[in-house]
Image (cartoon, rainbow, N blue to C red):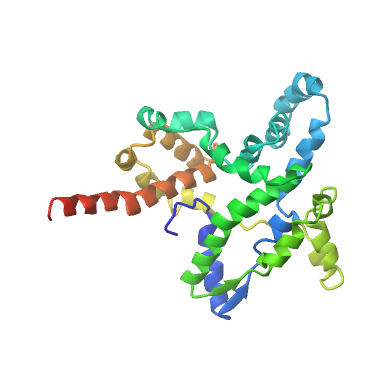
Amino acid sequence: MDEPLCNPIIIATYLVSRMARQTVTVALSGDGADESFGGYTRYVSDKIVDWYRLVPGVLRRGLFNPLIRRGLAAGQLKPLAEKADLPLNAERYLTWWAQFNAEDKRHLFTPGAWVDVDPTLPARVVQPYLDRVDSDDFRDRLAYTDLKMWLAEESNMRVDKMSMLASLETRAPFLDHELVEFAATIPFSYKLRGLTSKYILKQTFADLLPHEVIRRPKWGFFSPASAWLRADMKDLTVEVLSATHLAEAGLFQWRSVDELVQRHIRKEVYNLNKVWALLTFQLWYEIYIAQNEAYLAVVKDGG
């Protein structure tokens, strides 16, 4: 990938591309449809957050939030309740994406590295994209920012590089610039109707596609990476995220990292995305930075 893109489905994307290449040389992908037509589950969840925001703040914080924290469904509802108190800006946007919160980062970084961390940087990168959208619906701003950042910097790059690795050409019809520009003029209430995502897109093709396809719930594209970290990739993960390897970069505290890894391996906490992010970064660092520095040192010494 050449860059530390920490998404476990990179491997699944390659495997699917390799399978497709056995039959075809060019394939069409659906990339861009979710961003342009409101397909992601987080847009639905964000709408539920806004519904919860209609409850007066005094009641939310004094009555309902404590009940949610103690309730059986706290694991599902607690994040939504917490988001309801956030402003409609980059802070709320980043809660849908960030793997590590501020407290996590303080525990992860070494004291020396933490001094140089600018905790405001992610928000300062994201906020200009959110500000470009003149809409009262925060989902419009979410989707536009996803289009400019997630789609361009992760999704397109991942699909393009992994398909080319399998010698497969991919094309994304939903990224036709005229279609994207047209979709941007459609009110988000037409894209997310109630809790039905991609509503207008489904209605557009309702007479062309089988009923079961139109009505089928959204299926995410996942890989068994969580299990890999506990089995096939366990030794690799423990080795790469060991104290010796982490000291190479000097950014992360081994005890904090090891706790994340071991708790995931023991199935105490689902830490897939956090562990995968750290593993991806460390592998990238060792390949592209540490070896580079070693090479430069050799050149400098005239070796």
Provide residue 20's location: percent of width, then percent of height: 57, 75
User: Residue 63 vs residue 295: left or right?
Assistant: right
**Residue 46 makes an appearance in the image:** yes
Q: Position of residue 47 (x, y in %)?
A: 78, 42
Residue at figure coordinates x 73%, y 65% from the top left: 179
The residue at 67%/46% (across/down) is: 132
Q: Position of residue 278 (x, y in %)?
A: 44, 44
Could you say where residue 285 lies in the image, as x and y percent from the top left?
36, 48
Instruction: Spot the residue most to the left.
Output: 302
User: Relative to the observer, which residue lies in front, 150 or 283?
Assistant: 150
Is residue 42 visible in this depiction of the protein? no
* Residue 98 left/right relative to 211: left
Q: Nearer the viewer, residue 64 or 229?
A: 64
Q: Which quadrant is the C terminus positioned in?
A: bottom left
Decide: is 9 above or below 259: below
Which residue is at 58% across, 80% downward?
Answer: 24
